[in-house]
Amino acid sequence: MTNQLIALLDGREVGTVHYKESRLSFTYSETWRHDPNAYPLSLSMPLGSATHGHARIEAFLWGLLPDNDRVLQNWGKRFQVSPKNVFRLITHVGEDCAGAIQFVTPERLEMLIAEPAAREVQWLTEDDVAGRLRTLRADHSAWRAASDTGQFSLAGAQPKTALLFERRRWGVPSGRIPTTHILKPPTGEWDGHAENEHFSLQLARSLGLIVPNSNILRFEDEIAIVVERYDRARVGNRWVRIHQEDMCQALGLHPARKYENEDGPGVRKIVELLREQSSSADEDVASFLDAIAFNWLIAGTDAHAKNYSLLLGQNGAVRLAPLYDLASILPYPAVEMSKVKLAMKIGGEYRLRNIGLRHWRKLADELRLNEVKLIDRLRTMAQALPDQATTIQEQVEGQGLSHVTITRLCTRLKTRATACQRLLK
């Protein structure tokens, strides 16, 4: 069993993860460290230091895995490793992760170098994709078929799979070829969550926020929300991986600390990080505050630090990534709204029903922002939301996506937006 994993960033060898006596370390290759186009694996592991210790690389690796104990337990059984051993898990699923990173064994690296690219894709029929979605709905850990060569991992709690879409075909890539789209089937847990996410992404875009493209697609009798990966791009005749990391990874924090009330980052900490690291700090801070405002407006209660990410690139480029995993708590009747809390405090307050104009003013003061500009932006978004929600409901229903969650969500968003407009007077 290997005790080393080679780290690749868009196919280039950049370092090695070492595992010894249950402790991890990460060492950059000297070639990568001195490359003028190099960028770090994580902002928490700068290139200035050749080696980084257990706490940093362990937190980064856990951040690549699903936030779902059942999935990790099932993966542990499937691969015959401990679900609590992040190194062993990544050994099996680290070939296609969020960002440009791949973790492969030395033996697998030799195979990737020798393997023709044409052999790295297993093309699927529509019926094949439907079967995978059907299996995934029944078993949320079935992200890949047992026979697949390429394994992948994505953070998050919802069941999903990732595939390559090229020349109007879906396929399972491996090796050098990345996945390009994330497919999320509807599930019985939080019924209508996939529909909720698609609606919320479209609504965010309509209000001027930057989000990935998403669509509703049918495969035989199965339906899925399909999201284009913003960390993939077509350059010439090949797909490239674009590096990214979430805010917990960037700050060197274990994903268990993703919520502010569990010693995780809040709005202020993330704004500080953007001001220190972003290549366009003012623009990214404004975009991040738009996201905080949007989640307040729609009651997006799961907008924790792992649901915000940074894009890392050459020449020290760091930018806020497009928003993802947006969803509202509003359409779920079992939720007692008086107890609903946001993942991050606004002006010192978590509880949604208590957050009003004074909290936004306090936040502006804490962040040294132009209060008038911030409040004006909030009011503009709140005023535009009802009409945009109606338009998007008509669009998605016209595409064949009919679900009670969408009907409830649209109705309650309008009520919520009206209430927010009153609070901001």
Image (cartoon, rainbow, N blue to C red):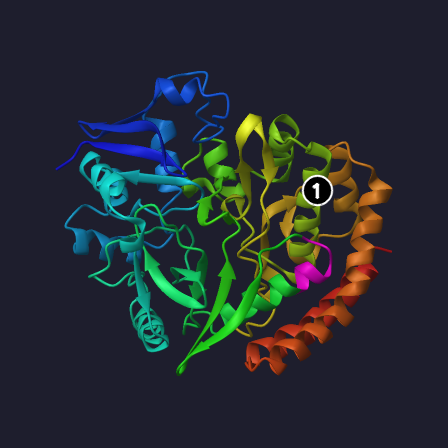
Image coordinates of residue 7 in percent, x first then y, are: 33, 33
Instruction: Name the residue at the left extreme.
Output: 1
The three-letter amino acid code for the residue at tag 1 is: Gly
In-image side of 300 versus 80 (left or right): right
Q: Residue at x 68, y 33 (%)?
A: 280
Q: Is residue 185 above or below residue 6?
A: below
Q: Is residue 187 above or below residue 246?
A: below
The image position of residue 208, as x and y in percent, is 73, 55
Q: Would residue 35 be seen by someone viewing this image from the given angle? A: yes
In the image, taking residue 267 as reference, residue 218 lies left or right, namely left
Place residue 134 in its image quadrant. bottom left
Residue 391, image quadrant? bottom right
Q: Nearer the viewer, residue 63 or 174?
A: 174
Task: Tell whether position 399 is magenta.
Answer: no
Chain part drawn in magenta: 203-209
Secondary structure of the residue carrying tag 1 is loop
Q: How many marks?
A: 1
Q: Quadrant location of the C terminus?
A: bottom right
The residue sitting at 40% across, 37% down in the picture is 254
Residue 282 position, x and y percent, is 73, 34
Q: Is residue 210 above or below residue 313?
A: below
Q: Which residue is mark 1?
A: 347
State the image coordinates of residue 207 (x, y, percent, origin top left). 73, 59
**In the displayed structure, does residue 378 sit left or right of residue 260?**
right
Query: Eyeballing the image, is 185 above or below 71?
Result: below
Q: Nearer the viewer, residue 64 or 333?
A: 64
